Amino acid sequence: MSYKIGYIDENPHQVKKFARALKEHGFIVIGYDIIKGMPIEDLIEQVYQSDVDLLMIDYFLKDKGILTFNGDEVERRYNEIKPKFPHIIFTSNEEDAFKDVDNPNIIYEKEMVTDDRVNRFSQILKKNIETYLSYIENRKIIIEELLNKGENEGLNASEKDQLLKIQMELNSLDAKNKNEVPLQLISNQKLEDISKTRKEAQEFLQSLIEKKK
């Protein structure tokens, strides 16, 4: 299975370089339309609409005078929208990024994408993506089991709380789509008639999983 990676770098040659290096390891790497002086909001929107499985962000984005912000600002802003989405800061020198990036564990040096280290790096990328997808899938399974139980036997108070909590967890994955979960699913009153909410829940879950593919 191939995964799609978005790579934010003001230098399109760098995007092509890493696209070639990661292609044979099962990744499709895409770049973004970066225009001199573009606001960070425009770049964030491009990323949001690109439907990628993981985001790589070059740390030094403003050193050539094209952008007015660095990768740590992009990472921080995108993390507010999609807090669990897999992403890394990519840099030529880890020490440069260390002082500005909130989470040092997401910093990787570009030397990782060399002949003798690229296999390890590709495994790291894959692990990040699959951990995120598993997080969603596991919660989908729990919701499905609770909906089945609710339809056949009914749910106790603890199970209703669990169902609501997991639905809200999934909803929090994307701050721009807070209404993606039908309001009926986060209503205790509606949970009393779980069979009526089942179809809506299934439709929501399916759309969520398709969106994350």
Image: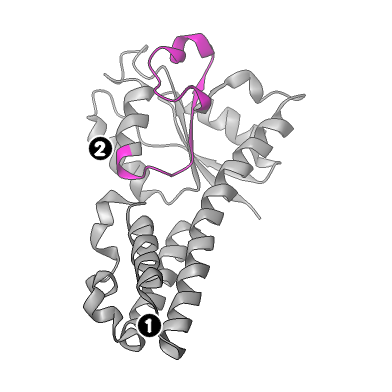
Q: Earlier in the sequence, mark 2 or mark 1?
A: 2
Query: Which residue is nearer to you in this view: 19 or 127?
Result: 127
Q: Which residue is mark 2?
A: 42
Give above or below for 131 relative to 62. Answer: below
Give above or below for 18 relative to 159. Answer: above
Q: As drawn, is 94 to the left or to the right of 179? A: right
Which mark is on residue 198? 1
Q: As drawn, is 120 to the left or to the right of 207? A: right
Q: As drawn, is 12 to the left or to the right of 134? A: left
Q: Residues within 10 Å of mark 2 (few under 14, many from 20)?
A: few
The verdict on residue 83 being magenta is yes
The residue stretch that appears in magenta:
80-105
Helix, strand, or loop for circle 1? Answer: helix
Residue found farthest to the right: 116
Picture colour scheme: one colour
Who's the residue at 40% across and 48% down the image?
Answer: 50
Q: What percent of the width, then of the height, locates residue 81?
A: 30, 43
Contact flag, marks 2 and 1 (Cβ < 8 Å): no
Q: Nearer the viewer, mark 2 or mark 1?
A: 1
Disc 2 residue type?
Asp
Residue found farthest to the front: 157
Who's the residue at 26% across and 71% down the image?
Answer: 182
Give the quadrant of the N terminus. Answer: bottom right
Q: Which image quadrant is residue 58 in?
A: top left
Q: Which image quadrant is residue 204 in?
A: bottom left
